[in-house]
Image (tube, helix red, strand yellow):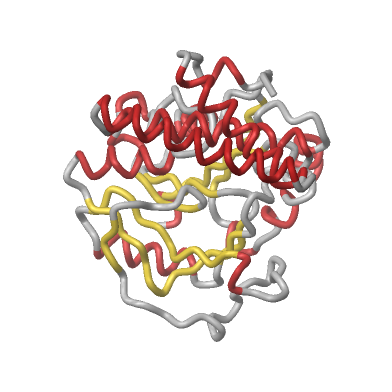
Amino acid sequence: MLKDISIVLVTYNSEHIISSFLNQPQLKKNKIYIVDNASSDKTTILIENNFKSVNLIKLKKNIGFGSAINKGLKKIKTKYALIINPDTFLSNTFFKDLEKAIKKYSNAGMIAPTIIDNSKFKNPPQSEFLISNTNIQPKHDQKTNFVHGACFLIDPSLFKNREIFDKNIFLFFEDNDLSEQVLKKNLDLIILGNCFVYHQGEKSSKKTSKIVSLRNFHYGWSHCYFTKKYNSNIYSYLFIFYLLLINLKRFLFASVVFNKNRSLPSYNRCKGIIAFTIGKKSKDLRDNI
C-alpha cells in the first residue's frame, strides 16, 4: 500500500526545518516530491546535497502554497498523495494507520490524522515525536466538515487536471476551500482518532517581519475571498466590513501601546482586506508587502 502513496510538500526558506523533516524514518519508503517556492536561503542546496532520492521541483518565483502543491501533484505516479507541511513529525505507526483507513473508508475524499500542535507540549518534541503514542489519548475516528492543510491524504484524480487547490488563493484558506469542494462531491472528510502528527505551526519558513507581513496580508485577502466564494453578496460585504473594522481596531490599539508584534499583523490584514475589496488578485501581490 505504501507504493500507492507519494508525499508532496512545499518549501519556502525552510533550511532550518527541512532536514529534520526528511530524516524521519517513517518517510524512507515513500516517493517524496518537494516543490520549492523560490527560496532565497539554502533549502534547495540542503536537499540536493543530502537527500538524493527526493524529487525536487525548483520554481523561479513564489507562486503560493496551493499552486505549488498542484504542480507537485502533476508529477506523481501513485493513486494517493499525502500533502504535508515540513514542520510536522509523524507517529511511528502513521502509515500503518493510514493504510487501514484507506481500506475502511471507501467513500473518503480526504483522510487526515489528528493534528497535535505546540499548545499540547511544554517542550516541543523533535523528530522522535510519538515514537510511542503513550502521551496521546486515542479517540474515535470521525467525519468532519474541515480538514487541516498541515497533513492529509487525497486522490488528486478527483479534480480536473489534478489541481486540488484553487489557484486564485496564494496563501491561507486553501484547506477550507478544498474541504468544501470535497464535500460537494458527496465524499467524506475523515479525521483518524489514533493516527497522529505533531505540527509545530508556522515553522515552515523562518519568522521574519517580512514573513509575518506576507502571512497576514494574504490571510486577510484569502479570508475575504473564501467568504465571498461561498456566501451571498450582502453577507460577504457585511462580513468583510466587519473584518476590516476588527483588524483596524486591533491595529490602532496596538499602535497606541507601541506593541509592534500586534500592530504589524493587524495592519497587514487590513491591507489584504482592502486589496481584495478593490479587486486586486492575491497571486499578483506576493511581493506587495
Q: Estimate the x, y position of residue 262 in percent, counting from the top left.
A: 69, 46
Instruction: Spot the residue most to the bottom.
Output: 134
Q: Residue at x 19, y 40 (%)?
A: 185
Q: Is residue 250 above or below residue 280?
A: below
Q: Nearer the viewer, residue 249 or 59?
A: 249
> Which quadrant is home to the C terminus?
top right
Query: Quarter of the image holding residue 128?
Result: bottom right
Q: Nearer the viewer, residue 3 or 104?
A: 104
Residue 155 left/right relative to 223 = left
Q: Give residue 126's quadrant in the image.
A: bottom right
**Residue beneath the point at 66% across and 61% down:** 24
Farthest-out residue, front: 256
Residue 142 versus residue 108 in the image, above or below: below
Q: Position of residue 227 (x, y in %)?
A: 35, 34
Residue under the point 64% across and 64% down: 25
Position of residue 237 measured from the top left corner of the image (x, y, whole percent): 35, 27
| Number of marks in picture | 0
In the displayed structure image, the side of residue 267 where residue 160 appears, left or right: left
Residue 133 lies left or right of residue 38; in this view the side is left
Q: Nearer the viewer, residue 108 or 280?
A: 280
Image quarter hosting the N terminus: bottom left
In the picture as drawn, the residue positioned furthest to the left comes out as 186
Residue at 56% in and 31% down = 218
**Whole-percent x, y for residue 204 in the image:** 67, 46
